[in-house]
Image: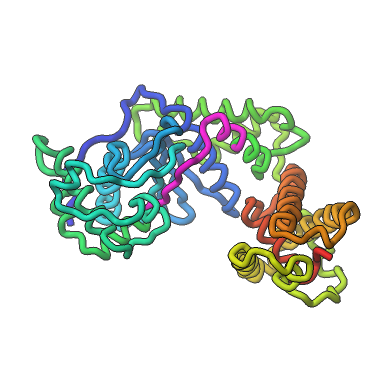
Amino acid sequence: MIIEETINREAGDKAKGPRLQRLRCVSLVLDAIKNAENPHIYAAVEHKDDVFIKDASKSSDYLEQNKNFDEATTFTFNSAPVLNTMVGFCDLWVEYIVKSKEVFLGFYTTRKVGKEYKTTEIKSLGIELPDKSILELLKNYELDHPNLLPCVKALILSEYKKQNSGKKGQGNIKNLEAFTDEDWKTFLKSIDWKFEEIDEEELQKQVIQKIKDCKYYSVTALSGTEETILRNLLDLLDERQCIPDLLGRFVNTSDIKLIFYQVGGGQIQTKKDDPVYELWSKLPSPTDKRNLPDKIQAVCASFDTARKKQLVRRTAMSRVLQDANTADKSFLSLRYRIFDKCEEALLEYLKNIKVENLNSSDEVMKVFNLLFDVARKHIQTVSLDFKYSFSSDTVIEGIVLELFDSCFLALD
């Protein structure tokens, strides 16, 4: 396979990336730093795509397209911005295959997903649409759904030929036409579709919290300076984008750490480990041997079956994660912190209501949602002082459910 000359999709040297791109770039960099023991991250906007993240420790690249359009309308696979993105992704995919490098692709938008209808183009291609939205199927990786793959291939190849029509060469069209169905599936599995995502205003709030959670953040030295740190990070991306030399355009982990250090007046310090992990092993063994479904059944026999199955699945996923991290002291500390706070909140809640009032699915879920919220807020607070290997909302909520299943918490 040979890489052919393709359309240059990068912005000009003097162009500044839109705010959403820069915020997403900062957000992804902070995530990568948080999830790596010794992070070696390189990032840029408008390099190959809207956002470029290289994790040197994993030898992988992540490239993302950002689409901040009117949230009242929807995207279908046949929408011009989506097809244009797919053409660009195809060129990137071929480039990375030839270089034997690992790449992951992302599509981030504030818009919702719509279902395709038979346009003139679709009729002329003689393809049959799937009975579900193509983007929903791709997002959920249901790649064997009837009519999906033939439809996706036909639309991408048609758009690719249009964009390269009249240009010198035909880009990678021959390489793409040689793809097998398995090649297409591998390519489509590499794309992370993110729809109905938050806009710049909400994303900025999220990034501010990630700055507080960063291992380079010190409450003593940096409390109240989060917006200054963010502004410096965004400015740095802008400045680097204007550098003509390609290597000079990247922001790396050391640059990020230096900004925290400079804003803190040279007083930056890495967060400490949370020492309460020792208390987890000292908890007395529970005497209540019922699992999560049993505890729900005890207070609400009519609890919705589908919802119960969903809670059981989330509990099982949390158990797998916890079993894989039994030696992780920060994870044990996280679990203890959540247990301690949820037990307190649960006892206080149950003092003010009668157990027999938990007689509907909504009332039981109200208790779980209360505990999820209490746990999330508590971990956000203690994360200002201590570092944790995991602290996402999904992980925290899973731990709450598992504490019921492993008999440390109960509804009665």
Q: Where is residue 316 in the image (x, y as percent from the top left)?
A: 62, 69
Q: Does the magenta stretch include residue 89?
A: no
Task: Quadrant for residue 326, please give it.
Answer: bottom right
Q: How is the image coloured?
A: rainbow
Asked if residue 180 is positioned above or below residue 216 in the image, the reply reads: below
Q: Position of residue 124 (x, y in %)?
A: 13, 46
Please give left or right for residue 266 compared with residue 253 in the image: right
Q: Which of 381 and 30 is in front in this view?
A: 381
Which residues make up the magenta segment? 191-206
Q: Does the magenta stretch include residue 198?
A: yes
Asked whether the viewer can see residue 110, the reply is: yes
Q: Nearer the viewer, residue 214 or 82?
A: 82
Q: In which quarter of the image is the N terminus?
A: bottom left
Please give left or right for residue 331 compared with residue 233 in the image: right
Asked if residue 393 is positioned above or below residue 408 in the image, the reply reads: above
Q: Nearer the viewer, residue 404 or 166?
A: 404
Q: Which residue lies furthest to the right in this view?
A: 351
Task: Quadrant for residue 381, please give it.
Answer: top right
Residue at (58% x, 52% y) in the render:
35
Q: Quadrant of the C terminus?
A: bottom right
Q: How many discs mark residues in the rendered view? A: 0
Task: Quadrant for residue 240, please give it.
Answer: top left
Residue at (47% x, 50% y) in the render:
55
Q: Position of residue 388 (x, y in %)?
A: 69, 53
Q: Which residue lies furthest to the top in this view?
A: 14
Q: Position of residue 379 (x, y in %)?
A: 74, 49
Asked whether the viewer can see residue 321, the reply is: no
Please give left or right for residue 407 compared with residue 96 in the image: right
